[in-house]
Amino acid sequence: MRQILFAAGIALAVSILLTPLLIKLFSRQGFGQEIRVEGPATHQSKRGTPTMGGVAILAGLWAGYWGSHLIGMGYDAEGPSASGLLVLGLATSLGVVGFLDDFIKIRKQRNLGLNATGKYVGQVISAVIFGVLALQFRGGSGLTPGSLNLSYVRDYATVTMGAIVFIVFCCFLVIAWSNAVNLTDGLDGLAAGSMSLALGAYVIITFWQYRNACATAPDTGCYDVRDPLDLALICAAGAGACIGFLWWNAAPAKIFMGDTGSLALGGLLAGLSITTRTELLMVVVGALFVAEAASVMIQVAVFRSSRRRVFRMAPFHHHFELSGWAETTVIIRFWLLSAMASAIGLALFYSEYLAAVGG
């Protein structure tokens, strides 16, 4: 438990202290955000706000993870694990893709960075490397970070994938989650606040898996997850880094996370869902991100088939802005929706455990 608190505290401190330095640096370099012309008119005033603040989130994430391990050595804590390093690697590689996207936007002074093909290539390469390595590194209990079985709260023994299908599945999850968080990052603090809530829920989930791991506490309802405690550290560090960044990113934002942050955080969700054996549960905990992505797909599908729009603008947080809601009202209400989704996810997780133990 100490390690988890250390991870969150260190990540928060690094993120909240590093972000203002990035604001000064990026402002001096002219690394300002370009704004969609067709977006809400109120957003045009945000043009030029420093972007690529996701660098602070990634720095906090890594610092929290390694710092907690260094401090934890004095308490005979477990060292870094394959699962933890793979999830961190996935988030970082997607952050690099996002950084390239942001940098091209800045250099060309437009709201389009990497083309769709370039972005998908980066996401797929990251996902394939993660998927291949996730089936390696068997621990003492024989578990690998990833599983060939589809999972809700634990593996479905009847739904098994081959290695190739598993890698394709990883690509789907990485692309889906990274793009979902990227689409949600359209209002000041919306993505950072929502991610803090989702990762906070996963701190509880992974710590519960650690306390009831089959490798250390074999009993009815135990969990076959390779490195649950290390994943809890990543969740705590991610939540702390997002909260630290939110201090500067809350409306009116002094800096945006950019694709550097949103793609990295989406990769974090994808990696955690696979390594914790909770791919389907993550859909509930991250329901706000799912809804944002779904609103874009619905808008595009309906418009192409009928030339009509379901929403005034997609992602649908812009729909509410154009309907007259103040930006802060949309943000706070969406945070509440994210909190409810996280709470429902926790309730489903615990109810499954009670059913497994016959409670």
Image (spheres, rainbow, N blue to C red):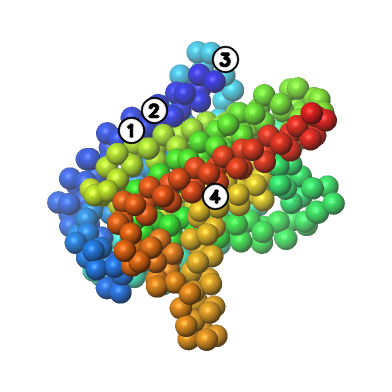
Q: Identify which amino acid the numbered label 3 is placed on.
A: Asp
Q: Kindly identify the residue that appears in the image at 67 percent across and 59 percent down.
A: 169
Q: Which residue is mark 2?
A: 10
Closest to the camera, between mark 3 and mark 1, is 1
Residue 160, placed above or below residue 86: below
Disc 4 from disc 3: Cα separation = 34 Å
Mark 4 surroundings: few (<14), some (14-19) or many (≥20) residues within 10 A: many
Closest to the camera, between mark 3 and mark 2, is 2
Residues 240 and 316: in front is 316
Q: Identify which amino acid the numbered label 4 is placed on.
A: Gly
Mark 1 surroundings: few (<14), some (14-19) or many (≥20) residues within 10 A: many
Q: Are marks 2 and 1 in contact (CB under 8 Å)?
A: yes
Of all residues, the one furthest to the front in this rendering is 324
Disc 3 from disc 2: Cα separation = 19 Å
Q: Which residue is mark 1?
A: 14
As helix, strand or loop, the secondary structure at mark 3 comes to loop
Disc 2 from disc 1: Cα separation = 6 Å
Closer to the N terminus: mark 3 or mark 1?
1
Closest to the camera, between mark 4 and mark 1, is 4
Closer to the N terminus: mark 2 or mark 4?
2
Residues 206 and 66: in front is 206
Q: Which residue is mark 4?
A: 286
Closer to the N terminus: mark 4 or mark 1?
1
Residues 347 and 10: in front is 347
Mark 3 surroundings: few (<14), some (14-19) or many (≥20) residues within 10 A: few
Which disc, if any, is residue 76? 3
| Residue 171 position within the rendered picture, expressed as x and y whole percent measured from the top left | 60, 60
Closest to the camera, between mark 2 and mark 4, is 4
